[in-house]
């Protein structure tokens, strides 16, 4: 289970892959290495279609993308930003679980992402399906089930 490992682990780094098992990956990161975004889905027939994206600045200072693959309406996506924002504001260590691989070499892309306190960095071409996020004091949000 992803959550079991999310609330454990110790690291001094501001980004660390703490567990890789099969297709699941868990990372530990400090809050200012996370960028949240609701992206308008222009290829959808629905005018109110948005995708939730979370960029994580890795140890190479490139942005890996955790994606929630289901389409959300603007209100739902904004609510997701607000809920995860609370987790980021109340925690010093953030644990993110997803499906995918962050161990392959990055491919530097032209897309740039601005991390408020860190600066602007390129995307690395690595995408994971977002599953869960938590902080060290126990605030948790799952992809489909909320808190």
Image (cartoon, helix red, strand yellow):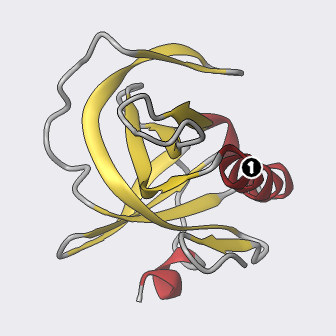
> In percent of the image, x 26 and y 50: which residue is there?
102
Q: Which residue is mark 1?
A: 75
Q: Position of residue 26 (x, y in %)?
A: 40, 66
Q: Quadrant of the C terminus?
A: bottom right
In the rendered structure, the answer to whether residue 19 lies left or right of residue 27 reads left
Q: Is residue 117 above or below residue 110?
A: below
Q: Is residue 126 above or below residue 108?
A: below
> In percent of the image, x 20 and y 50: which residue is there?
103
Q: Residue furthest front?
A: 45
Q: Is residue 84 above or below residue 47?
A: below
Between 45 and 24, the residue placed more toward the observer is 45
Q: Position of residue 107 (x, y in %)?
A: 17, 25
In the rendered structure, the answer to whether residue 48 lies left or right of residue 97 reads right
Q: Position of residue 109 (x, y in %)?
A: 26, 17
Between 50 and 68, the residue placed more toward the observer is 50
In the rendered structure, the answer to whether residue 36 lies left or right of residue 22 reads right
* Mark 1 crowdedness (10 Å alpha carbons): few <14, some 14-19, many ≥20: few
Q: Position of residue 15 (x, y in %)?
A: 48, 46
Report how many numbered discs are placed on residues in the image. 1
Q: Secondary structure at mark 1?
A: helix
In the rendered image, which quarter is residue 124 located in? top left
Q: Is residue 138 above or below residue 65?
A: below
In the rendered image, which quarter is residue 50 located in? top right
> In percent of the image, x 48 and y 40: which residue is there?
56
Q: Quadrant of the N terminus?
A: bottom left
């Amino acid at each position: 289970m992803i959550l079991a490992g999310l609330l454990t682990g110790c690291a001094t780094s501001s980004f660390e892959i703490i567990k890789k098992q099969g297709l699941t990956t868990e990372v530990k990161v400090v809050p200012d290495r996370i960028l949240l975004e609701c992206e308008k889905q222009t290829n959808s027939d629905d005018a109110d279609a948005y995708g939730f994206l979370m960029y994580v600045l890795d140890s190479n200072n490139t942005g890996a993308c955790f994606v929630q693959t289901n389409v959300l309406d603007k209100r739902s996506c904004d609510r997701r930003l607000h809920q995860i924002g609370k987790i980021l504001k109340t925690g010093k260590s953030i644990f993110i679980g997803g499906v995918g691989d962050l161990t392959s070499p990055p491919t530097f892309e032209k897309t740039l992402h601005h991390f408020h306190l860190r600066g602007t960095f390129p995307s690395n071409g690595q995408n994971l399906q977002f599953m869960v996020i938590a902080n060290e004091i126990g605030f948790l949000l799952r992809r489909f089930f909320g808190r």
